């Protein structure tokens, strides 16, 4: 009899301890279920991936427009782009696809002429990409104006070069890749859907006034900004 009562007491104690353990365990577990209203989700670099490509070979420009701006992977580079030149000397532009910055846009003029660099923006991710056009339009046109610095060469008079520098215009135009038509918009962004691309060109023209010698023109680096929202 005494033994049976002892067993009952032990059973009750064990039950109380088990219930208390479960209560503490649930309380500890429940603390991991707190949900913060400030939680955010950031797309990975693979999910949101925008790449700028340049045309490798200037001779490819001769057929680029004729073929409705068709290209293959062998025609483009994600690190540089060459220039199509007419009456001037250009350089090789550098592309940084981490910051989406293009640099080394330079030209050398001794007479009138123009230089063009063509680039392609490809949305290689899973989300719509919105190209920021804030303060980067002229009227309704998608144009980015580039600042410049002109340097006299081979004895050219600096004052005349400074005057000639005013005659050098550099801007960036955005085009429909299927037919090369100029894109015009009043929006502060341009949408590029996943798998789509858009063509843009850096266009430099010089038509005078003329200096008494050759001069170089250095253009500022420029950065294209993209986001998943407007």
Image (cartoon, rainbow, N blue to C red):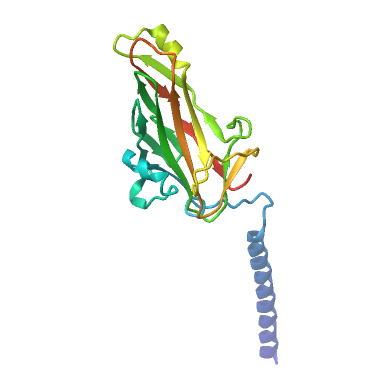
Q: Image quadrant for the C terminus?
A: top right
Counting from the top left corner in percent of width and height, residue 23 is at 69, 68
Q: Residue at x 56, y 52 (%)?
A: 193
Q: Is residue 31 left or right of residue 177?
A: right
Question: Quadrant of the image for the N terminus?
Answer: bottom right
Q: Quadrant of residue 92?
A: top left
Q: Nearer the viewer, residue 148 or 79?
A: 148
Seen in the image, is 115 located left or right of residue 169? left
User: Foreground residue, 120 or 225?
Assistant: 120
The answer to whether residue 45 is above or below residue 55 is: below
Residue at the left extreme of this rendering = 154
Residue 227 occupies which quadrant of the picture?
top right
Which quarter of the figure has residue 33? bottom right
Q: Position of residue 9 (x, y in %)?
A: 69, 82
User: Residue 202, position in %: x, y?
Assistant: 45, 33
Instruction: Work out whether residue 15 or residue 117 is closer to the camera in this orientation and state it.
Output: 117
Residue depicted at 35% across the width and 36% down the height: 82
The residue lying furthest to the front in this view is 66
Q: Is residue 27 above or below residue 42?
A: below
Q: Residue 153 location in percent, x, y? A: 32, 14
Q: Name the residue located 64 percent from the left edge and 67 percent from the top edge.
A: 25
């Amino acid at each position: 009899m005494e033994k049976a009562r002892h067993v009952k007491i032990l059973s009750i104690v064990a039950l109380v301890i088990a219930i208390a353990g479960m209560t503490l365990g649930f309380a500890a577990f429940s603390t991991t279920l707190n949900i913060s209203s400030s939680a955010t989700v950031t797309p990975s670099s693979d999910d949101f991936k925008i790449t700028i490509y340049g045309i490798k070979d200037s001779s490819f420009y001769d057929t680029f427009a004729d073929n409705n701006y068709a290209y293959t992977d062998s025609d483009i580079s994600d690190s540089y782009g060459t220039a199509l030149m007419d009456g001037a000397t250009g350089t090789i532009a550098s592309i940084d696809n981490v910051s989406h910055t293009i640099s080394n846009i330079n030209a050398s003029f001794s007479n009138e002429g123009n230089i063009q660099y063509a680039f392609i923006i490809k949305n290689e991710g899973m989300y719509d990409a919105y190209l920021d056009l804030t303060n980067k339009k002229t009227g309704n046109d998608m144009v980015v104006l580039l600042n410049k610095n002109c340097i006299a060469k081979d004895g050219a008079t600096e004052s005349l070069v400074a005057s000639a520098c005013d005659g050098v215009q550099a801007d960036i135009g955005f085009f429909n890749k299927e037919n090369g038509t100029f894109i015009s918009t009043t929006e502060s962004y341009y949408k590029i859907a996943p798998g789509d691309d858009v063509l843009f060109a850096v266009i430099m023209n010089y038509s005078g006034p003329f200096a008494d010698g050759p001069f170089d023109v250095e253009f500022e680096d420029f950065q294209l900004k993209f986001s998943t929202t407007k």
